[in-house]
Amino acid sequence: MTTQDLGRPLTQDLAEDRGQLDGLFEASPASSTRTSAAAVLAFVAGTVAVLLSPFSVQLGAAVVLAATALVASVVGLARASRPGTSGAVLASLGMVAALGTAAVVGLRYVGVDTAVADGLGAGLRDAAAALTALFPQP
């Protein structure tokens, strides 16, 4: 039968090893990374703009949110390039959503009817009323 040397005697207490391991984790440098607020704003505004773009009533809000997302995504990409700051993907997605909204709005001004969700208004209202009826009234 062969034996292996584990590097410590069998009689050594495991609590001593655990203390050394805790000391190793406490001594390691913790990297603090934060997400750029401009990148988060770009993502949220771009997503809402894309969701509002199929409705003709919400065209103005979609344009304003797309412009906000475009500006915030440029700022978010600039801030995310700094060390210790993340959010480049969020800013990029916000920019894509803003440009997509701009394309849909541009098509509408050219004459292509992109207001595909206008007929959904009554159906969405009825669905919201049905969901509200499921919950007890206070």
Image: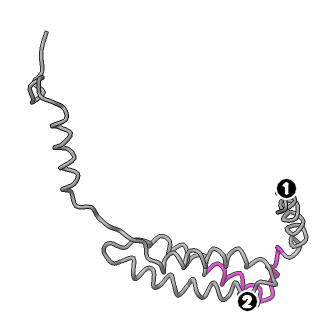
SS class, disc 2:
helix
Relative to 37, say whether 110 is above or below: below
| Picture colour scheme | one colour
> How far across and how far down the image is residue 9, in percent?
8, 25
Q: Is residue 85 left or right of residue 56?
A: left
Quickly name the residue at label 2.
60
> How far across and how far down the image is residue 67, in percent?
60, 88
Give neighbour class at mark 1: few <14, some 14-19, many 20+ (Cα, 10 Å).
Answer: few
Q: Is residue 26 left or right of residue 32?
A: left
Quickly name the residue at label 1.
134
> How far across and how far down the image is residue 132, in percent?
84, 62
At x 82%, y 73%, the residue is 117
At x 50%, y 74%, the residue is 92
At x 58%, y 87%, the residue is 68
At x 77%, y 77%, the residue is 54
Main SS category, magenta section = helix
> How far across and how far down the image is residue 18, in percent?
21, 39
Q: Quadrant of the N terminus?
A: top left
Q: Point out the stretch of residues depicted in magenta.
A: 99-117
Q: Quadrant of the C terminus?
A: bottom right
Q: Is residue 111 left or right of residue 72?
A: right
Q: Is residue 43 left or right of residue 107?
A: left
The three-letter code of the residue at mark 2 reads: Gly
> Which tag, 2 or 1, sits closer to the chain's start?
2
Relative to 3, say whether 112 is above or below: below
The three-letter code of the residue at mark 1 reads: Leu
